Structures are given as structure tokens and as C-alpha cells.
Amino acid sequence: MMNVRQATPEDVTVCVALAEARRDAYEAYEPRFWKKSPDSASACRTWFETLFSDGRSMCFVAEEEGSILGFVIGRGFPTPPVYDPGGATAMIDDFCVVSADRWGDVGRALLRDIRAEMRRQGFAQVVVVSARRDLEKTAFLEEAGLSLASTWWTSAI
């Protein structure tokens, strides 16, 4: 049976591995914007260690039979002063599952629990970051009731 719980510093190694696999895929989608730095795993480890213990970030893992199947990290994010979504904004930038076919169960459970925590903390909206070509994640987010709000375009200058 799958269980969603708060992430702990002991989960960092597995979450970094999941994030690195996602970065590899995203770099293939758009090699300029998503280009991994040579020390991406080390930087990610340091960042996740901070987030998993800072008391402000909302960090969850989904596990089954002792294996982590995915994770999600949410944080408060400044709402631009020219918009009024009805309250504070939370952003999910790091949201990974072990394989694309697990968005429907693992992703859904993680999103459900982090949204509940966001509501509990008084956030009014969530913004989830995803690559344009991450089709499985995009389909999952649409099925979960999220709408596409923005796109970013990039080129060399």
C-alpha cells in the first residue's frame, strides 16, 4: 500500500536521483533552458537538504514497501502585485515520480496531500512547473484540474 508522508533529510539521496533523471529528460526536450550544470546533483542535494529541514517548505514523498516512488516540493512564491488570485501563491517546482506511468497514482496522491497542506497554510493558488514536452505530466495536471497559465520561450542572444 502506498503511503504519502513528509520528506526527511534521509530521503534526499533518492529524491536527488529522481530529480536528476528528470533533468536528463528535460535537457533532451530543450537543451539550452534545461541544460544541467556539471554539479547539478551536488547542488540539488544541498538544496533539498535545506528544503527538507527548513520548516517553511512543504515536502512530501510517496513510498510503497520501503521504496520512494515520487516526491513533491512546494513553497510560498511572491504573487506579482499586478495580479490578484485571491490570496497567496504556492509554487511546485520539483515534482517527480519514478516512471511516467505513475503520475495517475503516485502523482495524484502527492498532489492531493500537498494541496491539502497548502490550503491548511492559507494559500489561494498553486503554480506547478513542468516542461512543455513532458506530455505525461501535462496530461496528469490537466486531469487533476490545473490549467495552463503561461509559457516561456527561449533562445540564445
Image: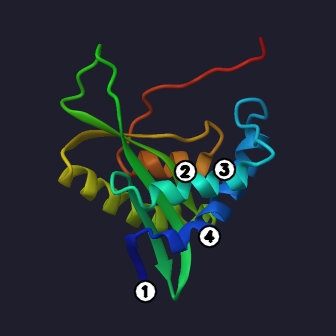
Question: SS for tag 2?
Answer: helix
Question: SS for tag 4?
Answer: helix
Residue 12 vertical position relative to residue 38 in the rendered view, above or below: below
**Pointer 2: what residue?**
137
Instruction: Give yes or no for contact between labels 1 and 2 (Cβ–Cβ under 8 Å).
Output: no
- Callout 2, which amino acid? Lys
**Quadrant showing the N terminus:** bottom left
Q: Horizontal placement of 34 versus 126: left or right?
A: right
Q: List x then y, in percent, for residue 75.
A: 38, 45
- Callout 3, which amino acid? Ala
Question: What residue is drawn where x is 54% and y is 25%?
Answer: 151
Q: Horizontal placement of 82 versus 99: left or right?
A: left
**Pointer 3: what residue?**
43
Distance between the alpha carbons at the discs numbered 1 and 3? 32 Å
**Pointer 1: what residue?**
1
Quarter of image, res 3: bottom left
Earlier-in-chain disc, 1 versus 2: 1
**Along the viewing direction, whichever of 41 and 112 lies nearer the viewer:** 41
Instruction: Give yes or no for contact between labels 4 and 1 (Cβ–Cβ under 8 Å).
Output: no
